[in-house]
Amino acid sequence: MSDQLAYVVRISPVHGRGVFANRDIAVSECVIEYTGREIPWSVALERAAEQDMPHNHTFFFSLANGNVIDGGDQGNEARYINHSCEPNCQAIEDEGRIYIYALHDIKCGEELSYSYPLIYDGRHTPAIKRSFACRCGAPGCTGTMLAPKKRRRKQKGPEQASHD
Protein backbone atom coordinates (compact mmCIF):
# COMPACT_ATOMS: atom_id res chain seq x y z
CA MET A 1 0.00 0.00 0.00
CA SER A 2 1.27 3.46 -0.88
CA ASP A 3 1.13 6.76 1.02
CA GLN A 4 -0.43 8.26 -2.11
CA LEU A 5 -4.16 8.91 -1.77
CA ALA A 6 -6.03 5.97 -3.33
CA TYR A 7 -8.68 8.03 -5.11
CA VAL A 8 -9.43 11.28 -6.92
CA VAL A 9 -12.79 12.85 -7.88
CA ARG A 10 -13.37 13.93 -11.47
CA ILE A 11 -16.05 14.00 -14.15
CA SER A 12 -17.44 10.52 -14.79
CA PRO A 13 -18.68 9.01 -18.05
CA VAL A 14 -21.23 7.12 -15.94
CA HIS A 15 -22.89 10.03 -14.13
CA GLY A 16 -21.83 13.48 -12.94
CA ARG A 17 -18.75 13.20 -10.78
CA GLY A 18 -17.09 9.91 -10.02
CA VAL A 19 -14.27 8.58 -7.88
CA PHE A 20 -11.28 7.12 -9.69
CA ALA A 21 -8.28 5.11 -8.54
CA ASN A 22 -5.33 7.50 -8.15
CA ARG A 23 -2.99 4.53 -7.85
CA ASP A 24 -3.29 0.77 -8.04
CA ILE A 25 -5.57 -0.52 -5.27
CA ALA A 26 -5.20 -4.06 -3.91
CA VAL A 27 -8.06 -6.49 -3.38
CA SER A 28 -9.64 -6.09 0.08
CA GLU A 29 -8.00 -2.70 0.62
CA CYS A 30 -10.15 -0.18 2.47
CA VAL A 31 -10.33 2.68 -0.02
CA ILE A 32 -12.39 5.26 1.86
CA GLU A 33 -14.96 5.69 4.61
CA TYR A 34 -18.38 7.05 3.60
CA THR A 35 -18.83 10.00 5.94
CA GLY A 36 -21.54 12.50 6.73
CA ARG A 37 -24.00 13.32 9.46
CA GLU A 38 -26.06 10.41 10.83
CA ILE A 39 -29.75 11.29 10.83
CA PRO A 40 -33.09 9.47 11.10
CA TRP A 41 -34.85 8.54 7.83
CA SER A 42 -37.65 10.96 8.68
CA VAL A 43 -35.15 13.85 8.70
CA ALA A 44 -33.58 12.61 5.46
CA LEU A 45 -36.98 12.67 3.76
CA GLU A 46 -37.65 16.18 5.10
CA ARG A 47 -34.27 17.38 3.83
CA ALA A 48 -34.90 15.99 0.36
CA ALA A 49 -38.34 17.63 0.26
CA GLU A 50 -37.04 20.99 1.56
CA GLN A 51 -34.28 21.08 -1.03
CA ASP A 52 -36.72 19.99 -3.71
CA MET A 53 -34.10 17.45 -4.70
CA PRO A 54 -34.83 14.87 -7.34
CA HIS A 55 -35.49 11.60 -5.55
CA ASN A 56 -32.62 10.04 -7.49
CA HIS A 57 -30.02 12.60 -6.40
CA THR A 58 -29.38 12.25 -2.70
CA PHE A 59 -26.33 11.11 -0.77
CA PHE A 60 -28.20 9.02 1.79
CA PHE A 61 -26.61 5.75 2.90
CA SER A 62 -28.84 3.42 4.95
CA LEU A 63 -27.54 2.00 8.21
CA ALA A 64 -28.60 -1.19 9.97
CA ASN A 65 -29.98 0.83 12.90
CA GLY A 66 -32.60 2.44 10.63
CA ASN A 67 -30.81 5.79 10.33
CA VAL A 68 -28.92 7.13 7.34
CA ILE A 69 -25.62 8.84 6.76
CA ASP A 70 -26.24 12.04 4.81
CA GLY A 71 -23.11 12.37 2.70
CA GLY A 72 -24.33 15.81 1.62
CA ASP A 73 -23.94 17.06 5.22
CA GLN A 74 -20.28 17.03 6.30
CA GLY A 75 -19.62 14.19 3.86
CA ASN A 76 -16.51 13.39 1.88
CA GLU A 77 -15.59 12.26 -1.63
CA ALA A 78 -17.11 8.78 -1.11
CA ARG A 79 -20.52 10.28 -1.91
CA TYR A 80 -19.42 10.53 -5.55
CA ILE A 81 -18.79 6.81 -6.01
CA ASN A 82 -21.19 5.71 -8.73
CA HIS A 83 -23.34 2.60 -8.89
CA SER A 84 -22.43 -0.36 -11.08
CA CYS A 85 -24.21 -3.65 -11.70
CA GLU A 86 -20.73 -5.23 -11.79
CA PRO A 87 -18.87 -3.22 -9.13
CA ASN A 88 -15.20 -3.26 -8.22
CA CYS A 89 -15.87 -2.21 -4.60
CA GLN A 90 -18.28 -3.07 -1.83
CA ALA A 91 -19.63 -1.10 1.09
CA ILE A 92 -19.38 -2.72 4.51
CA GLU A 93 -20.98 -1.39 7.68
CA ASP A 94 -18.92 -1.75 10.85
CA GLU A 95 -20.40 -0.41 14.10
CA GLY A 96 -22.47 2.23 12.33
CA ARG A 97 -19.71 3.36 9.98
CA ILE A 98 -19.52 2.59 6.26
CA TYR A 99 -16.25 1.60 4.60
CA ILE A 100 -15.63 1.02 0.90
CA TYR A 101 -13.37 -1.96 0.12
CA ALA A 102 -11.91 -3.16 -3.18
CA LEU A 103 -13.52 -6.40 -4.39
CA HIS A 104 -10.52 -7.13 -6.63
CA ASP A 105 -7.34 -5.38 -7.73
CA ILE A 106 -8.16 -2.01 -9.28
CA LYS A 107 -5.78 -0.31 -11.72
CA CYS A 108 -4.86 3.34 -11.50
CA GLY A 109 -7.41 5.36 -13.51
CA GLU A 110 -10.33 2.92 -13.13
CA GLU A 111 -13.58 4.37 -11.83
CA LEU A 112 -14.59 3.01 -8.42
CA SER A 113 -18.11 1.66 -8.10
CA TYR A 114 -20.31 -0.38 -5.85
CA SER A 115 -23.81 -1.74 -6.17
CA TYR A 116 -26.46 0.25 -4.36
CA PRO A 117 -29.92 -0.84 -5.41
CA LEU A 118 -32.18 2.06 -4.45
CA ILE A 119 -35.45 1.52 -2.65
CA TYR A 120 -38.32 3.52 -4.07
CA ASP A 121 -41.67 2.86 -2.42
CA GLY A 122 -43.79 4.58 -5.06
CA ARG A 123 -45.01 2.99 -8.27
CA HIS A 124 -42.20 2.08 -10.65
CA THR A 125 -43.68 4.00 -13.59
CA PRO A 126 -41.77 4.35 -16.86
CA ALA A 127 -40.82 7.94 -15.86
CA ILE A 128 -39.49 6.77 -12.49
CA LYS A 129 -37.57 3.94 -14.15
CA ARG A 130 -36.01 6.44 -16.57
CA SER A 131 -34.98 8.73 -13.72
CA PHE A 132 -33.31 5.77 -11.98
CA ALA A 133 -31.70 4.40 -15.16
CA CYS A 134 -28.36 2.71 -14.69
CA ARG A 135 -25.62 3.88 -17.02
CA CYS A 136 -22.81 1.69 -15.71
CA GLY A 137 -22.21 0.05 -19.09
CA ALA A 138 -21.39 -3.34 -17.54
CA PRO A 139 -22.15 -6.36 -19.76
CA GLY A 140 -24.66 -7.60 -17.14
CA CYS A 141 -26.25 -4.19 -16.50
CA THR A 142 -29.85 -4.46 -15.29
CA GLY A 143 -30.71 -1.04 -16.76
CA THR A 144 -31.92 0.32 -13.42
CA MET A 145 -30.57 1.32 -10.04
CA LEU A 146 -33.93 0.48 -8.44
CA ALA A 147 -34.12 -2.48 -6.13
CA PRO A 148 -36.84 -4.87 -7.22
CA LYS A 149 -40.06 -4.28 -5.32
CA LYS A 150 -40.91 -6.96 -2.81
CA ARG A 151 -43.84 -8.96 -4.08
CA ARG A 152 -46.70 -9.37 -1.72
CA ARG A 153 -47.77 -12.94 -1.37
CA LYS A 154 -51.44 -13.48 -1.89
CA GLN A 155 -53.08 -15.20 1.00
CA LYS A 156 -54.55 -18.52 0.08
CA GLY A 157 -58.30 -18.64 0.17
CA PRO A 158 -60.11 -21.72 1.53
CA GLU A 159 -60.26 -23.20 -1.95
CA GLN A 160 -56.47 -22.79 -2.39
CA ALA A 161 -55.40 -24.05 1.03
CA SER A 162 -53.29 -27.14 0.89
CA HIS A 163 -54.60 -30.31 2.39
CA ASP A 164 -51.90 -32.42 3.96
Image (cartoon, rainbow, N blue to C red):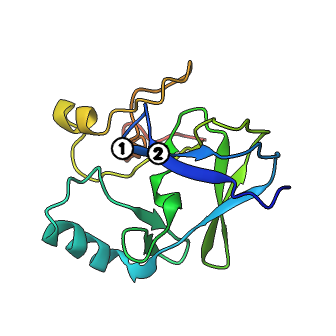
Q: Quadrant of residue 73?
A: bottom left
Relative to 53, is 97 on the left or the right? right
Residue shown at the point (20%, 53%) measured from the top left: 54
Q: Position of residue 52 (x, y in %)?
A: 13, 62
Decide which of tag 2 and tag 1 comes sooner along the chain.
2
- Callout 2: helix, strand or loop? strand
Residue shown at the point (25%, 32%) measured from the top left: 130
Q: Residue furthest front?
A: 4
Q: Quadrant of the C terminus?
A: top right
- Callout 1: helix, strand or loop? loop
Relative to 96, is 128 on the left or the right? left
Q: Does 128 sit above or below residue 78?
A: above
Task: For label 2, count other residues whose C-alpha is less than 10 Å away and answer few (under 14), some (14-19) or many (20+).
Answer: few
Identified by mark 2, the residue type is: Arg
Q: Residue 154, which numbered label?
A: 1
Front residue (pair 113, 39): 113
Front residue (pair 3, 68): 3
Residue shown at the point (22%, 50%) measured from the top left: 122
Task: Provide the residue designation for mark 2.
Answer: 10
Q: Quadrant of residue 16?
A: top left
